[in-house]
Image (cartoon, helix red, strand yellow):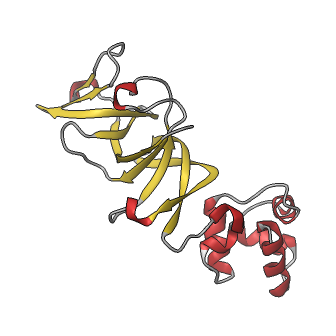
Amino acid sequence: MKVGDKIKELRKAERLTQADLAKKLGVAPTAVSAWEGNHNRPLMDKITVLAELFNKPITYFFDVEELGNTGDAIILPVYGNISCGTGAVLYEETGTYETTPKDWLNGGEYFYLRAKGDSMTGARIHEGDLLLIRRQDDVENGEIAAVVVEDEALLKRVFKSNDSIVLQSENPNYAPIIYNPEQNKQIKIVGKLKKVVLNF
């Protein structure tokens, strides 16, 4: 059964109209109609609300063929851009998820990003690779991290000394980027790189 069919079935069981459900989710009724017609699918934030509303696990709202055997796996979101607004870190939902083996994870919260550009090829990270990131706001010197600088997400090796942060690429064509407090730039570590899933 497809996700849209499941939503329709649950909605009818609760005797809700599409407009009723749309109101509870904070979306337009046309969005619910598109989901139920399997023309579109809800993003992760709406799936979370649907799961709570209908008392179902989040995995219920995925197609079975997408999940495979999830007994030893967990579903993680793939985020698009990351930005910092008013001190809060904002993650752009892409509506894409990856089934991830639980033995890749070791406590904490995880998500995926997609590699952009060629600045980290020396670390065998290439355009389009999936990057498994553990959410944390600091890393040890020399570790590779997802860093947001002025609302741009970068993946770099991080070094810290004398209040300065050095972001080092793994490609000799790119010079190190150095930030210090006097520059007054907003820089924030959002997570540590845990695994690269190669793009074949």
For image coordinates 80% across by 72% down, the residue present is 1
Q: Does 1 appear above or below 189?
A: below
Q: Position of residue 35 (x, y in %)?
A: 81, 62
Furthest toward the top, the residue is: 173
Q: Does 186 appear above or below 100?
A: above
Q: Position of residue 116 (x, y in %)?
A: 51, 30
Question: Along the line of sight, which residue is nearer the eye, 90 or 47?
Answer: 47
Residue 199 image-quadrant placement: top right
Q: How many marks?
A: 0
For image coordinates 68% across by 66% down, the residue present is 62
The C terminus sits in image quarter: top right
Question: Along the line of sight, which residue is nearer the eye, 128 or 93?
Answer: 128
Q: Is residue 119 left or right of residue 63?
A: left
Q: Does 90 appear above or below 3?
A: above
Furthest toward the left, the residue is: 162
Q: Is residue 77 left or right of residue 106?
A: right
Q: Is residue 34 left or right of residue 70?
A: right
Question: Along the line of sight, which residue is nearer the eye, 91 or 78?
Answer: 78
Q: Position of residue 114 (x, y in %)?
A: 52, 39
Residue 166 image-quadrant placement: top left
Residue 107 image-quadrant placement: bottom left
Q: Does 6 appear above or below 154?
A: below
Q: Position of residue 165 (x, y in %)?
A: 22, 31
